[in-house]
Image: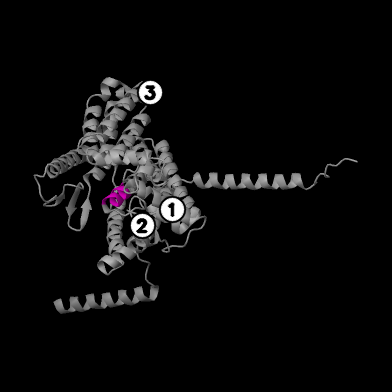
Amino acid sequence: MSGAPPADPQAPEVRGGARELTEAALSLLRGLLGRPLASYYLLVSSAGLLLVIGLAMVFSATSVEAFVTNGNAFTSIENQAISAGIGLLAFWLCQRLPVRTYRVLAKPGLIVAFVLIFALDVLALLAQAKVLKDPTFGPVRADELWLYLGPLQVQPSELAKIALALWVGDVLLRKGPQAGAWRELSRPLFPVAGVLFVLVGYNDLGTMICLVVLFVSMLWAAGVRLRIFAGMLVIALAGIVGLIYLPGNSYRQARIDAFTNPELHQLGDAYQVREGLFAIANGGWFGVGLGEGRLKWGWLPNGHNDFIFAVIAEELGVVGCLVVLGLFGVLAYTGLRIARRCTNPFRRLVAAGVTALIAGQATINLAGVVGLTPVTGLPLPLISDGGSALVVTLSMIGILASFARAEPAAAHALHARPPGRLARLLWAPLPPLPVAVMDRRVRAGRAAAGTERGDDG
């Protein structure tokens, strides 16, 4: 007798049923992705869910501190909600603009961003040199690169993201097939982009890295040769090292030292990363519950901003983190899908750049929170507290939505779609009146006409 267990005759059937179920699920997924407006709906749904999660987590991370400071737990979330409303308006406007409008606005937008960033860099230098005793000078806060417009705090470096994407796309489109040559890229693409990187990186190295990611991704989508990327990599690394060890920016060196030797730094960035890891460990698989986190109460610095992912991990656990990561994955996939399906070269280049910027910024933020890279201070797109960053990100989502609506199949489906209920209510012709009502009105009109003739006669 053999010691082997008898074969289960139902095992092949179970494996066959699982295979059929998997094939059915894949067929359903392919069918859903094959719909004309699939890119648009995936983009809007993933970005919308991230926005809702962000508003909930900002309220959770700021309510206690806002109540202690101002006596109102809704102070921070009110400002974030106002920024979200402005961002949704910008999203709606951007998804309605045609390509020619984006190309017209590219150069003026870049000039405006240059002027604002240069002016704020000059004020920052004056503040460091003690020429300005008060860093607040009119509508500008020199030490934080903020421009105050009423209740809004606008960072010109955020505006530079959209301006650079549109301008690079317009320049590459004008150069056509010659855009991959070094000589064509050196006039004026590399000099202008390099000056912008230096101006932004002087006070905001994290945003500069995001701009470099955007720039490189657009050149990659344009088919630039690999040896040019090798030269750009050497120049970029040299520039980043120079900005890190630039006199007056010792805090960047401290961040590098805290990352390489965290045991020697009990305060500062090493402390922030350690508390973030404690929050992640405290959350476990399912978290301690929304609003029930403890480390955000004075222990975790900037828990509402660049370390909000640690708050998510503590309160929603691994499951909540996977949901957020999955939504970012869907958003990145959809942006690349839009770039691949666009027939217009300008749309394809800008979509690739914007998608790489959003995905790259999220990756840099998450890597800093979990301790894989030094802390950069970048916010998590659509989730972290920050008005100007939220408005700009929603505007970029609106640009992607505009390109998704312009896909050939999507454009055909939108033009063939019957008007909605509201449109039918406002513009559809009125139904005919009943016959009895029409006869009564005709008789009344004839009687009135006869009376008028009699009076005139």
Residue 196 forms part of the magenta stretch: no
Disc 3 marks which amino acid? Leu
Marks 2 and 3, how far apart in space?
Answer: 46 Å
Location of residue 369 in the rendering, given as x and y in whole percent from the top left corner: 39, 47
- Which residue type does callout 1 highlight? Phe
Residue 457 can be seen, yes or no: no
Callouts 2 and 1 close, C-beta under 8 Å:
yes
Which residues, given as a range, are shown in magenta? Answer: 388-395
Regarding mark 2 in the picture, which secondary structure is present there?
loop
Whether residue 392 is in magenta: the answer is: yes
Q: On the image, numbered disc 2 is attached to which residue?
A: 299
Which residue is more in the foreground, 41 or 457?
Answer: 41
Answer with the quarter of the image where residue 170 lies.
top left
Reading the image, the residue beneath label 3 is 226
Frontmost of labels 2 and 3 is 2
Left or right: 137, with 379 as reference point: left
Q: Earlier in the sequence, mark 2 or mark 3?
A: 3
